[in-house]
Amino acid sequence: MAENENVVAEPEKGKSFKAGLKEWFRKRIVALKVKPQIIPLVLMAITTVYFMLVLFNISKAIDMSSENKHTFATGICTFITTLLSLLYLVSFLNAFPKRKKPNIFFIVLVGVMIAGQIACDLVYYLQMNNCLNDIKVGSDMYIAVDSAQPYVLGHIVLLGISSVVFALLPVYSRLIRKINTSVKLESATENMHGNIDITED
């Protein structure tokens, strides 16, 4: 008898887990319906965290190549990128205030800040490339500068993805709102069969 009870209990656990998972996804979609701007915000936050993690390597490359004639703007460009990578998150939050219409000024400002970061990264990357062509291959400076270049490219790619997702926000927010997240509630009368006896004994 105990074995039969265990056999019945397992499918019930599986069903409850699937139902719980389905409900979790439904709630996430409902949250996205209310605040679709979460998607570009998460991408921008990931981009900022990535840049902060690779900043040590970039700073080391700047320090090693500080006396090179080609790298006169790498330091200021990195400083501007670091500053903007934090400020554009704050501006994004101000662009979508709670229970208010989106703020056009801050939306434009976020776009300008993303473009500014990409421009600074490109200036850094090109100047460091010129530096690599001017120094001895295999030297400590060459290794430091060369190892930081892929990180800068990665940041440019992440910024590009973030800008595209941010620009397409009005498009996919409409598509998300079309997803049916309503829960069908069964009526108690639908499951009742036959006549109800209301006569007194």
Image: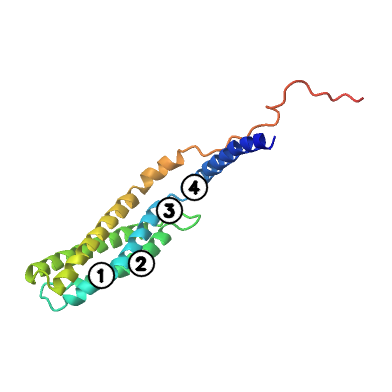
Label 2: which residue? Answer: 86
- Disc 2 and disc 3 in contact, CB within 8 angstroms: no
Position of residue 100 relative to residue 63, above or below, is above
First-in-chain label (1 vs 3): 3
Q: Mark 4 points at which residue?
A: 28
CA distance for labels 1 and 3? 30 Å
User: Does the residue at mark 1 contact the one at mark 3 (Cβ under 8 Å)?
Assistant: no
Q: Which of marks 4 and 1 is in front?
A: 1
- Specify the amino acid type for callout 4: Arg
What whole-number distance in Å separates the C-alpha atoms at marks 1 and 2? 19 Å
Task: Name the residue carrying label 3.
Answer: 38
Marks 4/1: CA–CA distance: 37 Å
Residue 178, image x and y in percent? 45, 38
Q: To which quarter of the image does residue 54 belong? A: bottom left
> Residue 76 or 171: which is nearer the viewer?
76
Q: Which residue is drawn at 19% across and 62% down?
A: 122
Residue that badge 1 annotates: 57
**Between 136 and 22, the one nearer to me in the picture:** 136
The earlier-in-sequence mark between 2 and 3 is 3
Give SS at disc 2. Answer: helix
- The kind of residue on which mark 1 rests is Asn
Alpha carbon of mark 2 to alpha carbon of mark 3: how far? Answer: 17 Å
